[in-house]
Image (spheres, rainbow, N blue to C red):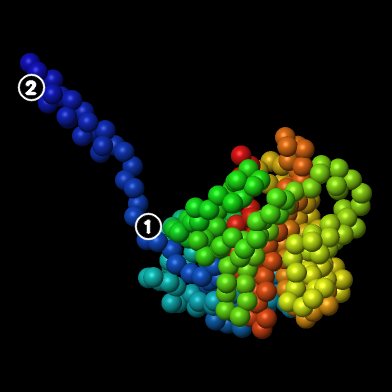
Amino acid sequence: MKKMALLGFLLMLNACKENQPKTRYLPNSSGKINHLSIVMPENSWNGFLGDKVRDLLLVPFEGLPFDEPQFSLKFIPDKVFKGFVKNSRNIIWFVNDSIGRFQLSENMMAKPQLVAKVSGEDQEVQAFFLEENIALLRASIIEIEQTEKLRRIKKSPSKDKVFSDRFKISMTYPTAYKNFKDTLGFTWIQKPIQNGHMNIIAYTLPINSLSDNIKKRIPVIRDSIGKAYIPGRLPDSYMITENAYRPYYYRTQINGKLAYLTKGTWEVANDFMAGPFISYMVRDTLKKRWMVIEGFTFAPSASKRDYMFELNTIISSVQFE
Protein backbone atom coordinates (compact mmCIF):
# COMPACT_ATOMS: atom_id res chain seq x y z
CA MET A 1 0.00 0.00 0.00
CA LYS A 2 2.81 2.37 0.94
CA LYS A 3 4.61 1.54 -2.33
CA MET A 4 1.45 2.34 -4.33
CA ALA A 5 1.07 5.67 -2.48
CA LEU A 6 4.71 6.54 -3.10
CA LEU A 7 4.40 5.63 -6.79
CA GLY A 8 1.31 7.81 -7.11
CA PHE A 9 3.09 10.73 -5.46
CA LEU A 10 6.09 10.42 -7.81
CA LEU A 11 3.84 10.31 -10.87
CA MET A 12 1.97 13.39 -9.67
CA LEU A 13 5.27 15.22 -9.00
CA ASN A 14 6.56 14.36 -12.46
CA ALA A 15 3.33 15.61 -14.05
CA CYS A 16 3.66 18.90 -12.17
CA LYS A 17 7.20 19.34 -13.44
CA GLU A 18 6.11 18.66 -17.02
CA ASN A 19 3.36 21.30 -16.73
CA GLN A 20 5.75 23.96 -15.46
CA PRO A 21 7.03 26.41 -18.09
CA LYS A 22 10.60 25.69 -19.11
CA THR A 23 13.17 28.33 -18.17
CA ARG A 24 14.61 29.84 -21.33
CA TYR A 25 18.41 29.97 -21.36
CA LEU A 26 19.79 33.45 -21.96
CA PRO A 27 23.50 34.23 -22.35
CA ASN A 28 25.07 37.03 -20.35
CA SER A 29 24.94 40.39 -22.07
CA SER A 30 28.07 42.29 -22.94
CA GLY A 31 29.19 45.84 -23.56
CA LYS A 32 30.83 48.81 -21.89
CA ILE A 33 28.81 51.07 -19.60
CA ASN A 34 26.77 53.69 -21.51
CA HIS A 35 27.44 52.08 -24.89
CA LEU A 36 24.48 51.51 -27.23
CA SER A 37 24.17 49.26 -30.29
CA ILE A 38 22.16 50.87 -33.10
CA VAL A 39 20.72 48.33 -35.57
CA MET A 40 19.37 49.55 -38.92
CA PRO A 41 20.13 49.35 -42.66
CA GLU A 42 23.31 51.13 -43.72
CA ASN A 43 21.47 53.61 -45.95
CA SER A 44 19.32 54.62 -42.95
CA TRP A 45 22.40 55.16 -40.76
CA ASN A 46 23.90 57.40 -43.43
CA GLY A 47 20.59 59.17 -44.01
CA PHE A 48 17.84 61.05 -42.18
CA LEU A 49 17.24 58.37 -39.52
CA GLY A 50 20.92 58.11 -38.57
CA ASP A 51 21.14 61.89 -38.21
CA LYS A 52 18.07 61.88 -35.94
CA VAL A 53 19.52 59.08 -33.76
CA ARG A 54 22.79 60.96 -33.32
CA ASP A 55 20.95 64.18 -32.58
CA LEU A 56 18.82 62.56 -29.85
CA LEU A 57 21.36 60.22 -28.23
CA LEU A 58 24.61 62.15 -28.46
CA VAL A 59 23.36 64.94 -26.19
CA PRO A 60 26.04 66.21 -23.77
CA PHE A 61 26.48 64.60 -20.35
CA GLU A 62 25.46 67.29 -17.87
CA GLY A 63 27.95 69.02 -15.59
CA LEU A 64 31.22 68.39 -17.44
CA PRO A 65 33.65 71.21 -18.23
CA PHE A 66 33.77 70.11 -21.88
CA ASP A 67 31.01 68.42 -23.86
CA GLU A 68 31.04 64.63 -23.86
CA PRO A 69 28.11 62.58 -25.20
CA GLN A 70 25.79 60.94 -22.69
CA PHE A 71 26.05 57.66 -24.63
CA SER A 72 28.51 56.10 -27.07
CA LEU A 73 26.93 54.65 -30.22
CA LYS A 74 27.97 51.59 -32.21
CA PHE A 75 26.31 51.10 -35.60
CA ILE A 76 25.41 47.52 -36.53
CA PRO A 77 24.02 46.86 -40.05
CA ASP A 78 20.80 44.85 -39.82
CA LYS A 79 22.20 42.17 -42.13
CA VAL A 80 24.91 41.24 -39.58
CA PHE A 81 22.63 41.45 -36.54
CA LYS A 82 22.89 37.82 -35.48
CA GLY A 83 24.85 35.51 -33.20
CA PHE A 84 26.83 37.07 -30.36
CA VAL A 85 26.06 40.56 -31.70
CA LYS A 86 22.58 40.14 -30.20
CA ASN A 87 24.11 39.87 -26.74
CA SER A 88 24.71 43.62 -26.44
CA ARG A 89 23.22 45.02 -23.23
CA ASN A 90 21.56 48.03 -24.88
CA ILE A 91 20.09 47.69 -28.36
CA ILE A 92 18.01 50.15 -30.37
CA TRP A 93 16.61 48.16 -33.27
CA PHE A 94 14.93 49.85 -36.24
CA VAL A 95 12.61 47.65 -38.29
CA ASN A 96 10.66 48.38 -41.46
CA ASP A 97 7.00 47.55 -40.78
CA SER A 98 3.61 48.81 -41.95
CA ILE A 99 2.68 49.43 -38.29
CA GLY A 100 4.58 52.20 -36.54
CA ARG A 101 5.38 51.63 -32.87
CA PHE A 102 7.96 51.90 -30.08
CA GLN A 103 8.49 48.87 -27.83
CA LEU A 104 10.78 48.39 -24.83
CA SER A 105 11.69 44.83 -23.87
CA GLU A 106 13.93 43.42 -21.16
CA ASN A 107 16.12 40.33 -21.53
CA MET A 108 14.93 39.55 -25.04
CA MET A 109 18.14 37.87 -26.29
CA ALA A 110 20.50 38.11 -23.29
CA LYS A 111 20.48 39.22 -19.66
CA PRO A 112 20.52 41.87 -18.42
CA GLN A 113 19.42 43.57 -21.61
CA LEU A 114 17.25 46.44 -22.81
CA VAL A 115 15.95 46.34 -26.38
CA ALA A 116 14.11 49.30 -27.88
CA LYS A 117 12.40 48.19 -31.09
CA VAL A 118 11.30 51.06 -33.33
CA SER A 119 9.03 50.13 -36.23
CA GLY A 120 7.66 52.14 -39.13
CA GLU A 121 7.10 52.10 -42.86
CA ASP A 122 9.99 54.51 -43.57
CA GLN A 123 12.76 56.49 -41.89
CA GLU A 124 10.52 59.47 -41.10
CA VAL A 125 7.96 57.35 -39.23
CA GLN A 126 10.67 55.52 -37.27
CA ALA A 127 12.32 58.84 -36.39
CA PHE A 128 8.96 60.17 -35.16
CA PHE A 129 8.38 57.24 -32.77
CA LEU A 130 11.95 57.46 -31.48
CA GLU A 131 11.65 61.18 -30.75
CA GLU A 132 8.24 60.76 -29.09
CA ASN A 133 9.71 58.24 -26.64
CA ILE A 134 13.26 59.55 -26.21
CA ALA A 135 12.79 60.67 -22.58
CA LEU A 136 11.54 57.20 -21.60
CA LEU A 137 14.38 55.55 -23.54
CA ARG A 138 17.10 57.67 -21.93
CA ALA A 139 15.71 57.08 -18.42
CA SER A 140 15.46 53.33 -19.03
CA ILE A 141 19.04 53.11 -20.31
CA ILE A 142 20.38 55.08 -17.33
CA GLU A 143 18.50 52.79 -14.94
CA ILE A 144 19.81 49.55 -16.46
CA GLU A 145 23.35 50.99 -16.68
CA GLN A 146 23.35 52.05 -13.03
CA THR A 147 22.10 48.59 -12.07
CA GLU A 148 24.87 46.98 -14.13
CA LYS A 149 27.52 49.31 -12.71
CA LEU A 150 26.39 48.52 -9.17
CA ARG A 151 26.46 44.79 -9.97
CA ARG A 152 30.08 45.11 -11.07
CA ILE A 153 31.01 47.13 -7.97
CA LYS A 154 29.46 44.45 -5.74
CA LYS A 155 31.98 41.91 -7.04
CA SER A 156 34.59 43.59 -4.85
CA PRO A 157 32.85 46.05 -2.50
CA SER A 158 34.59 47.97 0.25
CA LYS A 159 33.87 46.73 3.75
CA ASP A 160 34.98 50.03 5.33
CA LYS A 161 32.49 51.39 7.89
CA VAL A 162 33.68 54.99 7.81
CA PHE A 163 30.35 56.45 6.61
CA SER A 164 28.33 54.21 8.89
CA ASP A 165 30.40 55.06 11.94
CA ARG A 166 30.38 58.78 11.24
CA PHE A 167 26.92 59.46 9.77
CA LYS A 168 24.86 56.25 10.09
CA ILE A 169 24.66 55.86 6.32
CA SER A 170 26.09 53.25 3.96
CA MET A 171 27.07 53.23 0.28
CA THR A 172 28.28 50.54 -2.09
CA TYR A 173 31.68 51.42 -3.56
CA PRO A 174 34.78 49.52 -4.73
CA THR A 175 37.74 48.68 -2.51
CA ALA A 176 39.86 51.04 -4.62
CA TYR A 177 38.40 53.96 -2.63
CA LYS A 178 40.42 54.57 0.53
CA ASN A 179 39.85 56.81 3.53
CA PHE A 180 41.55 60.13 2.75
CA LYS A 181 40.28 62.40 5.55
CA ASP A 182 37.94 61.74 8.47
CA THR A 183 37.09 64.41 11.04
CA LEU A 184 34.18 64.95 13.38
CA GLY A 185 31.83 66.38 10.74
CA PHE A 186 33.53 65.58 7.43
CA THR A 187 34.57 62.35 5.69
CA TRP A 188 36.51 62.03 2.42
CA ILE A 189 37.38 58.87 0.46
CA GLN A 190 39.53 58.86 -2.67
CA LYS A 191 40.32 56.53 -5.58
CA PRO A 192 43.50 57.08 -7.63
CA ILE A 193 43.15 57.08 -11.42
CA GLN A 194 45.63 57.79 -14.20
CA ASN A 195 46.95 61.35 -13.70
CA GLY A 196 44.28 62.17 -11.13
CA HIS A 197 41.76 60.94 -8.59
CA MET A 198 38.04 60.40 -7.92
CA ASN A 199 36.56 61.57 -4.64
CA ILE A 200 33.47 61.24 -2.45
CA ILE A 201 32.91 63.53 0.52
CA ALA A 202 30.13 63.59 3.11
CA TYR A 203 29.06 66.08 5.77
CA THR A 204 25.91 67.25 7.52
CA LEU A 205 24.10 70.58 7.80
CA PRO A 206 21.44 71.81 10.24
CA ILE A 207 17.88 71.25 9.00
CA ASN A 208 17.32 75.00 8.50
CA SER A 209 20.42 75.51 6.31
CA LEU A 210 18.51 75.59 3.00
CA SER A 211 15.64 77.84 4.00
CA ASP A 212 16.75 80.60 1.58
CA ASN A 213 17.11 80.58 -2.22
CA ILE A 214 18.53 77.15 -3.07
CA LYS A 215 20.53 78.28 -6.10
CA LYS A 216 22.28 80.94 -4.02
CA ARG A 217 22.73 78.91 -0.84
CA ILE A 218 24.24 75.74 -2.34
CA PRO A 219 27.35 77.42 -3.87
CA VAL A 220 27.92 79.40 -0.66
CA ILE A 221 27.76 76.20 1.42
CA ARG A 222 30.04 74.31 -0.98
CA ASP A 223 32.63 77.10 -0.96
CA SER A 224 32.68 77.28 2.85
CA ILE A 225 33.18 73.50 3.08
CA GLY A 226 35.93 73.66 0.47
CA LYS A 227 37.74 76.38 2.36
CA ALA A 228 37.52 74.44 5.63
CA TYR A 229 38.30 70.90 4.44
CA ILE A 230 39.52 70.68 0.80
CA PRO A 231 42.83 72.52 0.32
CA GLY A 232 44.61 72.96 -3.00
CA ARG A 233 48.26 72.35 -3.73
CA LEU A 234 49.37 75.92 -2.98
CA PRO A 235 49.12 77.97 0.22
CA ASP A 236 45.72 79.66 0.71
CA SER A 237 44.16 77.61 -2.11
CA TYR A 238 40.94 75.61 -1.70
CA MET A 239 38.01 74.19 -3.67
CA ILE A 240 35.15 76.47 -4.75
CA THR A 241 32.24 76.28 -7.17
CA GLU A 242 33.35 77.55 -10.56
CA ASN A 243 31.50 80.77 -11.40
CA ALA A 244 32.08 80.62 -15.16
CA TYR A 245 29.70 77.64 -15.58
CA ARG A 246 26.22 77.76 -14.09
CA PRO A 247 25.39 74.51 -12.25
CA TYR A 248 22.32 72.40 -12.98
CA TYR A 249 19.87 72.16 -10.07
CA TYR A 250 17.19 69.49 -9.61
CA ARG A 251 14.67 68.62 -6.93
CA THR A 252 14.58 64.82 -6.58
CA GLN A 253 14.31 61.98 -4.05
CA ILE A 254 16.66 59.38 -2.58
CA ASN A 255 15.09 56.50 -0.65
CA GLY A 256 11.86 58.50 -0.44
CA LYS A 257 13.64 61.51 1.09
CA LEU A 258 13.62 64.97 -0.46
CA ALA A 259 16.95 65.79 -2.08
CA TYR A 260 18.52 68.59 -4.09
CA LEU A 261 20.83 67.44 -6.88
CA THR A 262 23.50 69.81 -8.20
CA LYS A 263 25.76 69.14 -11.18
CA GLY A 264 28.53 71.53 -12.09
CA THR A 265 32.24 72.22 -12.14
CA TRP A 266 34.66 73.05 -9.34
CA GLU A 267 37.91 74.94 -9.35
CA VAL A 268 40.61 75.74 -6.82
CA ALA A 269 40.94 79.33 -5.67
CA ASN A 270 44.50 80.60 -6.12
CA ASP A 271 45.54 77.52 -8.09
CA PHE A 272 45.00 75.92 -11.50
CA MET A 273 42.87 72.84 -10.81
CA ALA A 274 39.30 72.14 -11.94
CA GLY A 275 36.85 69.38 -12.76
CA PRO A 276 33.22 68.23 -12.54
CA PHE A 277 31.22 67.54 -9.38
CA ILE A 278 27.84 66.08 -8.43
CA SER A 279 26.20 66.87 -5.11
CA TYR A 280 23.17 65.44 -3.30
CA MET A 281 21.71 67.25 -0.29
CA VAL A 282 19.24 64.84 1.31
CA ARG A 283 16.77 65.96 3.98
CA ASP A 284 16.91 63.58 6.93
CA THR A 285 13.98 64.72 9.08
CA LEU A 286 14.46 61.86 11.55
CA LYS A 287 17.86 63.21 12.57
CA LYS A 288 16.92 66.86 11.83
CA ARG A 289 19.73 67.39 9.36
CA TRP A 290 20.69 67.64 5.72
CA MET A 291 22.99 64.79 4.71
CA VAL A 292 25.31 66.05 1.96
CA ILE A 293 27.18 63.58 -0.27
CA GLU A 294 29.29 64.85 -3.12
CA GLY A 295 31.49 63.29 -5.77
CA PHE A 296 34.14 65.11 -7.78
CA THR A 297 36.87 64.16 -10.23
CA PHE A 298 40.29 65.55 -11.07
CA ALA A 299 41.41 64.04 -14.37
CA PRO A 300 43.10 66.61 -16.63
CA SER A 301 43.14 65.81 -20.36
CA ALA A 302 40.91 62.75 -19.86
CA SER A 303 37.29 61.88 -20.57
CA LYS A 304 35.28 62.31 -17.38
CA ARG A 305 31.84 60.95 -18.27
CA ASP A 306 32.39 57.43 -16.99
CA TYR A 307 34.08 58.69 -13.83
CA MET A 308 31.12 60.90 -12.98
CA PHE A 309 28.67 58.12 -13.85
CA GLU A 310 30.42 55.87 -11.33
CA LEU A 311 30.30 58.54 -8.62
CA ASN A 312 26.61 59.18 -9.26
CA THR A 313 25.85 55.44 -9.10
CA ILE A 314 27.71 55.08 -5.80
CA ILE A 315 25.99 58.08 -4.19
CA SER A 316 22.58 56.90 -5.43
CA SER A 317 23.14 53.64 -3.54
CA VAL A 318 23.11 55.43 -0.16
CA GLN A 319 21.06 53.84 2.60
CA PHE A 320 20.06 55.58 5.85
CA GLU A 321 20.37 53.42 8.94
- Label 2: few (<14), some or many (≥20) within 10 Å? few
Amino acid at dot 1: Leu
Q: Position of residue 170 (x, y in %)?
A: 59, 48
In the rendered view of the protein, which quadrant contains the C terminus? top right
Q: Position of residue 111 (x, y in %)?
A: 44, 57
Q: Residue at the location (74% across, 66% down)?
A: 230
Comparing 283 with 272, the one in front is 272
Q: Is residue 16 above or below residue 44?
A: above
Mark linked to residue 277:
none
Residue found farthest to the top? 1
Reading the image, the residue beneath label 2 is 3
Tell me the residue that label 1 is attached to: 26
Question: Which one is in front, 26 or 71?
Answer: 71
In this rendered view, identify the residue nearer to me: 304 or 130: 304
Left or right of 169? Residue 160 is left
Residue drawn where x is 72% and y is 35% of the image: 286
Q: Is residue 279 above or below residue 267?
A: above
Q: Quadrant of residue 257?
A: top right
Q: Position of residue 134 (x, y in %)?
A: 68, 62
Numbered disc total: 2
Q: Alpha carbon of mark 2 to alpha carbon of mark 1: how far?
A: 40 Å
Query: Residue at position x 54%, y 81% from top?
Result: 42
Q: Which residue is located at x 48 percent, y 69 percent?
A: 31
Q: Give the percent coordinates (x, y) of residue 49.
A: 65, 75
The 10 Å Cα crowd at callout 1, few under 14, some 14 to 19, many 20 or more, is: few
Quadrant containing the N terminus in the rendered view: top left
Q: Amino acid at mark 2?
A: Lys
| Image position of 99 with respect to 169: above or below | below
Q: Nearer the viewer, residue 201 or 213?
A: 201
